[in-house]
């Protein structure tokens, strides 16, 4: 699914990632762990196309990232993002927040997705009217509305209590069972253990 | 259309600031252009009302300083195609505590241009006064111009604000006051399609005069050019102020909404759509501000026109073409002002969303 070959990334003179080689299979649930500043978020950013590496090559379904002509379309059709903060747009309803990721999504499709995540009653509410755990579920719904092949999550449980954190990971496991690849950067080792594989980053190396 | 409206509503303070900035600018453009056009239109109307051809003193910059021998009218009246002619002296004088009042000394055949609402047309040592100035006069029976006292024989009403705020008297009396024969001669012709031959014939009468079609005179009149240039300069400054207002406040708004644009970029929403969203928001602001400015300008002009102390001299004219021109200017201002913030928004790097960019 995703293959990283000799990936190196530098911020000015500082090496954030050093010669990373990695392969992630379709439907795999991968947790990237490491200390703060170890380079796990940088690795996630590179794998998700948000950041271009200083050196090395990346492949998505055997296609070189550099050969992707329209990165926007690529992201829209293949990738879902979940961040530590939900980044919901406050002036839009929950349904509209999900719709911005997929303009053509019907109300029924959105409601089905919300139903799957157990938040179908929130559709007409605004982000400031729901709890932190519910916001993160909405963020997950927004990431999934395009039926992405890969979901990238950067510390998705960073702002959640243990119960809501577990709920989020339950959703990830369900996604993997349905064939979606999930790559999560987290410093929570207990949660990381629930992944199929843990990749530990230390000083920019695996 | 719904999302941009929601976005504007969510940022009410900045939306209001941009609107105020735009409304002030557009209203300023409306007023300065309308008032300039009004001044030009009023004076043009006076000149056009009596003739197709205007005769002034040669090589003189302004009709106020022009001195033409009105005896020329006798010869001009004999020329082929001439069917009407009159002489006019344009001057200004203080009257009572009014610092400046326009004085029109005219040939008797021009009196019929002034519709009397009271009294009768003036004989020697008499004047008729415009409705606006009549209301301001303390002594409504006689007024003093220069060192002479004139009886007020009547009151007239004119659609031209300049005239409504002025005094009209016989050209002989005006000639004595201003020490000139006539400021200009106004000639009407029956040869509407070929007035050039009449112009040439009049020009041949004297090398001390300059003869032009009234339209050509208006198009080339220096005072009008000065008014138009000043109007354009002030309008440009107002436009620039509005533009800078949008650019600066919109840039702040875009900066504050960085996470919104970042998440959109991360979700794969194309840059052009984000640019389009900002442009649409700006267009809505420009359109709303234009409508507000349009109504405010009308209200302000109404009060200006009905302020007695202004004697009707300031008379704004908002035509359909001016409205359209300012509409385009307003939308242009909004769109141009939004270009830089829109591009900045579209270039928001979604990497900022990764742990608040603490990589």
Image (spheres, coloured by chain):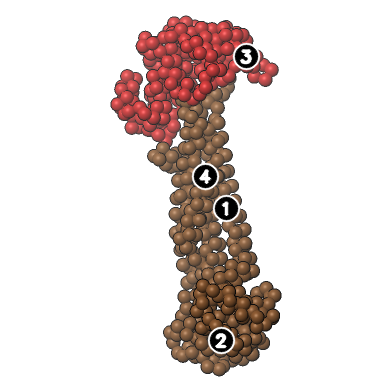
Chain colours: A red, B brown
User: Could you tell me which chain the residue with mark 4 belongs to?
Assistant: B
Which residue shows up at 44% across the image and 6% down it?
A196
**Residue of label 1:** B239
Q: Residues within 10 Å of mark 1 (few under 14, many from 20)?
A: many
Q: Residues within 10 Å of mark 4 (few under 14, many from 20)?
A: many
Contact between marks 3 and 2 (CB within 8 A): the answer is: no
- Mark 1 secondary-structure assignment: helix
The one of A196 and B34 positioned closer to us in this rendering: B34
Q: Earlier in the sequence, mark 2 or mark 1?
A: 2
Q: CA distance from mark 1 to mark 3?
A: 49 Å
Q: Is residue B148 visible?
A: yes
| In this view, the mark in front (2 or 4) | 2
User: Could you tell me which chain the residue with mark 1 belongs to?
Assistant: B
Q: Is residue A31 visible?
A: no
- Mark 4 secondary-structure assignment: helix
Q: CA distance from mark 2 to mark 1?
A: 50 Å
User: Could you tell me which chain the residue with mark 3 belongs to?
Assistant: A
**Residue of label 3:** A55
- Position of the N terminus of chain B, as image quadrant, is top left
Q: Residues within 10 Å of mark 2 (few under 14, many from 20)?
A: some
Position of residue B284 measured from the top left corner of the image (x, y, whole percent): 45, 46
Which residue shows up at 43% across the image and 33% down it?
A90
Q: Which disc, if any, is residue B77?
A: 2
Q: Which disc, if any, is residue B335?
A: 4
Tags 4 and 3 on a common chain: no
- Mark 3 secondary-structure assignment: strand
The one of A56 and A200 positioned closer to us in this rendering: A56
- Mark 2 secondary-structure assignment: loop
Which residue shows up at 62% across the image and 65% down it?
B225
């Amino acid at each position: 699914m995703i293959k990283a070959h000799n990936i190196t990334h530098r911020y000015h003179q500082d090496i954030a990632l050093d010669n990373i080689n990695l392969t992630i299979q379709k439907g795999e649930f991968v947790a990237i762990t490491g200390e703060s500043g170890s380079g796990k978020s940088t690795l996630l950013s590179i794998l998700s196309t948000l950041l271009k590496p200083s050196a090395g090559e990346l492949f998505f379904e055997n296609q070189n990232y550099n050969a992707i002509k329209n990165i926007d379309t690529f992201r829209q059709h293949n990738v879902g993002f979940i961040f530590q903060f939900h980044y919901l747009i406050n002036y839009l309803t929950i349904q509209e927040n999900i719709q911005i990721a997929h303009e053509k999504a019907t109300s029924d499709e959105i409601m089905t997705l919300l139903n799957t995540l157990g938040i179908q009653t929130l559709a007409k509410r605004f982000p400031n009217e729901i709890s932190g755990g519910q916001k993160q579920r909405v963020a997950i719904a927004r990431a999934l509305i395009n039926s992405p092949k890969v979901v990238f999550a950067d510390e998705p449980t960073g702002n959640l209590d243990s119960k809501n954190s577990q709920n989020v990971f339950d959703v990830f496991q369900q996604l993997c069972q349905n064939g979606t690849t999930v790559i999560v950067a987290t410093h929570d080792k207990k949660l990381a253990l629930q992944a199929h594989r843990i990749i530990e980053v230390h000083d920019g190396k695996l | 259309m719904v999302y941009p409206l929601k976005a504007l509503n969510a940022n009410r303070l900045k939306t209001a600031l941009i609107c105020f900035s735009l409304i002030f600018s557009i209203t300023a453009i409306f007023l300065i252009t309308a008032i300039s056009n009004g001044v030009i239109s009023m004076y043009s109307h006076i000149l056009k009302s009596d003739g197709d051809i205007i005769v002034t003193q040669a090589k003189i910059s302004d009709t106020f300083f022009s001195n033409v021998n009105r005896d020329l009218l006798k010869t001009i009246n004999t020329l082929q195609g001439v069917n009407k002619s009159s002489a006019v002296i344009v001057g200004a004088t203080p009257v009572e505590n009014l610092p400046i009042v326009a004085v029109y000394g005219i040939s008797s055949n021009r009196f019929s241009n002034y519709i009397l609402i009271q009294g009768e047309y003036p004989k020697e040592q008499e004047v008729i006064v415009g409705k606006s100035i009549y209301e301001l006069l303390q002594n409504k029976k006689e007024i003093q111009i220069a060192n002479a006292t004139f009886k007020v024989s009547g009151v007239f009403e004119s659609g031209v604000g300049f005239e409504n705020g002025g005094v009209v008297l016989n050209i002989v009396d005006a000639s004595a006051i201003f020490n000139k024969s006539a400021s200009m001669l106004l000639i009407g012709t029956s040869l509407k399609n070929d007035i050039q031959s009449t112009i040439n014939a009049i020009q041949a009468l004297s090398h001390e005069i300059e003869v032009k079609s009234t339209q050509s005179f208006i198009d080339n009149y220096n005072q009008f050019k000065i008014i138009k240039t000043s109007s354009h300069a002030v309008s440009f400054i107002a436009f620039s102020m509005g533009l800078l207002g949008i650019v600066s406040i919109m840039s702040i708004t875009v900066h504050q909404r960085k996470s919104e644009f970042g998440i959109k970029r991360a979700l794969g929403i194309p840059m052009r759509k984000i640019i389009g969203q900002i442009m649409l928001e700006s267009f809505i602001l420009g359109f709303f501000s234009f409508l507000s400015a349009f109504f405010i300008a009308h209200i302000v002009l109404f009060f200006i026109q009905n302020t007695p102390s202004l004697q009707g001299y300031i008379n704004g004219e908002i035509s359909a073409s001016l409205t359209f021109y300012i509409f385009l200017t307003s939308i242009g201002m909004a769109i141009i002002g939004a270009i830089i913030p829109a591009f900045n928004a579209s270039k928001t790097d979604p990497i900022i969303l990764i742990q608040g960019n603490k990589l």
